[in-house]
Amino acid sequence: MTAAVIVAAGRTDGKEHFAPEKQVGAISAVERVALLLQEAGIRQIAVACGPDDQVKKLVPSRNLVFLPVPPGGEMLHAVQAGLRYWAGRADAVLVAQVDVPLFSTDTVRALLAAPGDIRVPAYQGRCGHPVVLGGAAIPAVLAYQGPGGLKGALAASGLARQVVEVDDPGIRSNIQKGGDYLSLLPGRDMQRLRLSFQLRLGKERIFYGPGIHQLLQLTEETGSLSSACAHMGMSYSKGRKIVAVMEQQLGAPVLETQQGGASGGFSRLTAPAREMVQRYEALCAEAEGTLAQLFQKHFPPEGTAVSEA
């Protein structure tokens, strides 16, 4: 599995902060990056951001994980927070800067298909973002405490870079460096018609969909409903209400909990809840392929005639 971390906090040599809230087209920079990654097929995405709730409000209903990083730190600290979160679960991690939100989905796919522990895109011989780290690069960056940020960590690792040439000026377009990025907006991926859907299940009430699906997955991973809510930018009381509705409609308990004690408290999914998670995951995977075919049939690329069949 390839996961991603969107870096939205930290200092670099050239600036004191990132601008996740900046409008790029009709949406914020952080939402644009998240959409591009999802369109390219990456579903597991974490946002390394400040401890406040502002970034979370910019990307509603995108099923992202939020990793708060202490204020005043370096960009490398945000990268490390993301790598630490995905370590042991992802084979590779794509690292995207929120200030470089105009790369293409084709660039992401090219990076994912390339070999190597460090994969860097280049346009006309000049490297840019995002980058993909895998294998030995992840522990090397996590262990690094020297100067030079991510670039310094990669140089110190001694690992070879795999430079992936792409026809994409967006990899070098920084929204905090002048207005040149505006010329790249026409024709970009997010300007094209795309399919977007969410599946929900219900009985008397709708009780299962993308939100509670992620909540249950995170609860199982962290062993804590409270931690799962925090990762989603959701209050614990709201999380409890969502679980209660599911339990009432499903007619079965969703969580097994233990309070404190010598071994500490925990929350884990019951057998009916785990089965729901697995079946919903399979349903969405199959529906995505079917709906993509229907979308191509009814909304073919411009210049292609619509079949009358």
Image: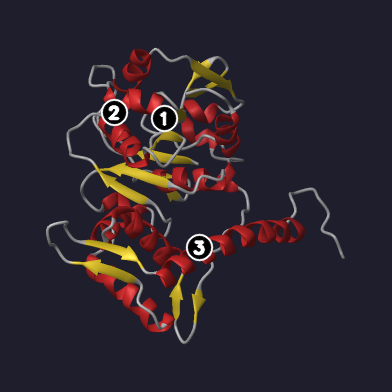
Quadrant in which the C terminus appears? bottom right
In 3D space, how far apart are the residues under numbered discs 1 and 2 (Cα atoms)?
18 Å
SS under mark 2: helix
The residue wearing badge 1 is: 174
In 3D space, how far apart are the residues under numbered discs 1 and 3 (Cα atoms)?
40 Å
Q: Position of residue 287 (x, y in %)?
A: 63, 62
The amino acid on which the numbered mark 3 sits, given as a three-letter code, is Gln
Pick out the residue farthest to the bottom. 204
In 3D space, how far apart are the residues under numbered discs 3 and 2 (Cα atoms)?
35 Å
Q: Is residue 285 above or below residue 15?
A: below
Residue placed at 74% from the left, 61% from the top? 298
- Whichever of callouts 3 and 2 sits on the residue coming sooner in the sequence is 2
Q: Position of residue 7 (x, y in %)?
A: 34, 37
Residue placed at 53% from the left, 66% from the top? 279
Specify whether 103 is left or right of 294.
left
Looking at the rendering, which quadrant does residue 284 occupy?
bottom right
Q: Which mark is residue 76?
A: 2
The residue wearing badge 3 is: 278
Tell me the colour scheme of the image. Answer: secondary structure
The amino acid on which the numbered mark 1 sits, given as a three-letter code, is Asn
The amino acid on which the numbered mark 2 sits, given as a three-letter code, is Leu
- Whichever of callouts 1 and 2 sits on the residue coming sooner in the sequence is 2
SS under mark 1: loop
